[in-house]
Amino acid sequence: GAVVSQHPSWVICKSGTSVKIECRSLDFQATTMFWYRQFPKQSLMLMATSNEGSKATYEQGVEKDKFLINHASLTLSTLTVTSAHPEDSSFYICSARDSERGGRETDTQYFGPGTRLTVL
Amino acid sequence: AQTVTQSQPEMSVQEAETVTLSCTYDTSESDYYLFWYKQPPSRQMILVIRQEAYKQQNATENRFSVNFQKAAKSFSLKISDSQLGDAAMYFCITGNQFYFGTGTSLTVIP
């Protein structure tokens, strides 16, 4: 149980185009999902918290107009990188909390396998 | 602000031996969880063990155990009988919003 999927696993795009990454909780409902960015050999950096049915909360320094997040259902959150540039190339990871486990804010996060974005 | 410090960027252990990864943190929260996750070369984050701060008993999961010292804000991970599959980056995490440590890269020597 508690499986999170991401699609695509790997994407290459041209500079200036937009890319959408999907994050799905496969066997549980998630009112809260998280988006992280990871540079090579570094830790994960929280970009934003995605809440079902409401606007995402972005961390300081993350451009909300560039990284659009939509959490339209209890099992799906999407991250759209708009007008991508080479510096946006990175590994993007999503995670989700199981809402049916009590909803404690400090509960376990289940991570997706990540999406490698390369912008040419 | 919350901070998590992993002072060992790299560690190595002989197969079947025991290794301890250290972690210290700072938090203003009174009720919180702490986690160790590992990230193998596949980059899939995998939960290793979690500890509830209000519980004094140290968590244990098979070969993995923690030494949780709440007053000292220390949360170390002990891996017993190390296996080749334990080789990974290990992250100490705490807090509501999952504050990550910088990670410890563990190498297991056959």
Image (tube, coloured by chain):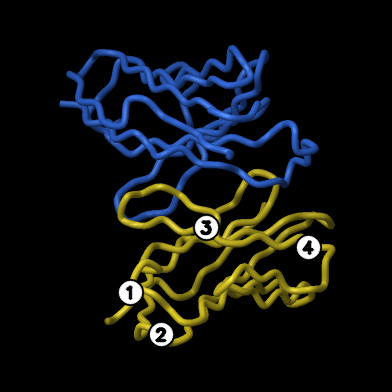
Chain colours: A blue, B yellow
Among the 4 quarters of the image, the one containing residue B52: bottom right
Place of residue B40 in the rendered image (x, y in percent of width and height, measured from the top left): 36, 57
Among the 4 quarters of the image, the one containing residue B57: bottom right
Tell which tag, 2 or 3, sits nearer the viewer. Answer: 2
**Sequence-first disc among 3 and 4:** 3
The answer for how far apart the CA atoms under marks 2 and 3 are is 21 Å
Place of residue A60 in the rendered image (x, y in percent of width and height, measured from the top left): 55, 35
**Label 2–label 3 contact, CB within 8 A:** no
Q: Tell which of B54 and B74 is nearer to you.
A: B54
| Amino acid type, callout 3 | Tyr
Residue A30 vs B38, above or below: the answer is above
Place of residue B84 in the rendered image (x, y in percent of width and height, measured from the top left): 33, 72
The answer for how far apart the CA atoms under marks 3 and 1 are is 16 Å
The residue singled out by tag 2 in the image is: B16
The residue singled out by tag 1 in the image is: B107
**Sequence-first disc among 3 and 1:** 3
Q: Residues within 10 Å of mark 3 (few under 14, many from 20)?
A: many
Place of residue A108 in the rendered image (x, y in percent of width and height, measured from the top left): 65, 47
**Sequence-first disc among 1 and 2:** 2
- Asked if marks 1 and 2 fall on the same chain, the answer is yes
| Amino acid type, callout 2 | Ala
Please state if B30 lies on the left or on the right of A66 as rendered. right
How many numbered marks appear? 4
The residue singled out by tag 3 in the image is: B37
Please state if B16 lies on the left or on the right of B64 as rendered. left
What chain letter is assigned to the residue under label 3?
B
Element on which disc 3 rests: strand
Q: Residues within 10 Å of mark 1 (few under 14, many from 20)?
A: many
**Sequence-first disc among 2 and 3:** 2
On residue B53, the disc is: 4
The quadrant of the picture occupied by the N terminus of chain A is: top right
Element on which disc 4 rests: loop
